[in-house]
Amino acid sequence: MSTDRLNQTLTQAIEQLSASESLEGIFHQHREGDPLPSSKALGEIIELSRSILFPGYFGKSTVNSQTIKYHIGVNIERLHKLLTDQIMAGLCFNRCDCNVMDSDQEQCRTEAKSLAALLIERFPKIRKVLATDVEAAYNGDPAAESFGEIISCYPVIKALTNYRIAHELVELGVPLIPRIITEMAHSETGIDIHPAATIGDHFTIDHGTGVVIGATCIIGNNVKLYQGVTLGAKSFRLDENGNPIKGIPRHPIIEDNVIIYANATILGRITIGMNSIVGANVWVTQSLAPNTKKYKQVKSDNIDFEYLDGGGI
């Protein structure tokens, strides 16, 4: 390709990529001083949070009973600053009206500081429920030899740490940042949990890869999932323009003490009753009564059929 032809090709590409019609819906216009969420800063936030919630297992410092208060104090001070910056970035990104020259930005920062402090205030509660998740993972896996192994090695704990922090941010009304945090865990572990989902205590996911938990899911206590489980939406209600209506309940409710085995797919706003068991590779689109077992069996002629012990609703 000649120099003239090369320059013409690049110029044409620049013109096409800069054209307003090609940018519709995918262009975020910056004004001077507007912050944007930083994946690097959010990564540090997660690392600091994990080191605070599980001292001695995450982070770079050596922690013992004499130094733990100092280390947690230093980490929380750093965490609050980072959280303030990132929450502010999320607020400004969502509102698109914060300008460096306006009082709006200072008000946004004040709000972000308060929200960051409120999140940190909830860390004792987050640690308490994460401890039950560690216990559930340990009790549910005969291969696990210690709680320390669960915390250090099992992807479910990393995914749930991100989720439980992100869920509290959702509860506090923080936009954008919670979804980024859970998607970071998704990339790290293969476990996709929407931060708006509600999950009780003593929750675990064995192996974990490929699990999907939708935004309006409600999961009770003592629930166990295996890899590849999907708790998704069956269909979407449409508005008068044919677009999906957002914000309506569309994902399953999983009651207490339910086990769902590998690659099961449960769709729609249905209820899986307490103490039920859903077998591997089963497709469920209707509610199951409590104490139901639903799974596939294989006949001698290799034809699969589903077996329901208990009943639907």
Image: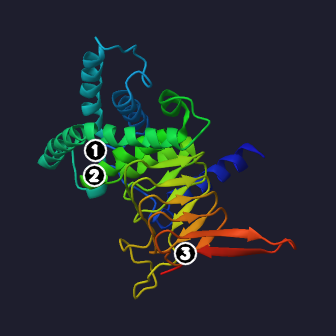
Q: Residues within 10 Å of mark 1 (few under 14, many from 20)?
A: many
Within 10 angstroms of label 2, few (less than 14), some, or many (20 or more) residues? Answer: many
**Which one is earlier in the sequence, the residue at label 2 or at label 3?**
2
Disc with the residue nearer the chain's start (1 vs 2): 1
Mark 3 residue crowding within 10 angstroms, few (<14) / some (14–19) / many (20+):
some
Front one among 57 and 247 = 57
Q: Residue at x 40, y 35 (%)?
A: 46
- In the rendered structure, are the residues bearing label 3 and label 1 in contact, judged by CB atoms less than 8 Å apart? no
**In the visual, does 31 lie left or right of 38?**
left
Residue type pointed to by label 2? Val
Q: Identify which amino acid the numbered label 3 is placed on.
A: Gly
Find the distance from the CA under tag 1 to the CA under tag 2: 7 Å
Q: Position of residue 147 (x, y in %)?
A: 48, 31
Residue 174, numbered label: 2
Q: Residue 87: give its label.
A: 1
Mark 1 is on which residue type? Ile
- Hey, which quadrant is residue 135 in on the image? top left
- Residue marked by disc 3: 310
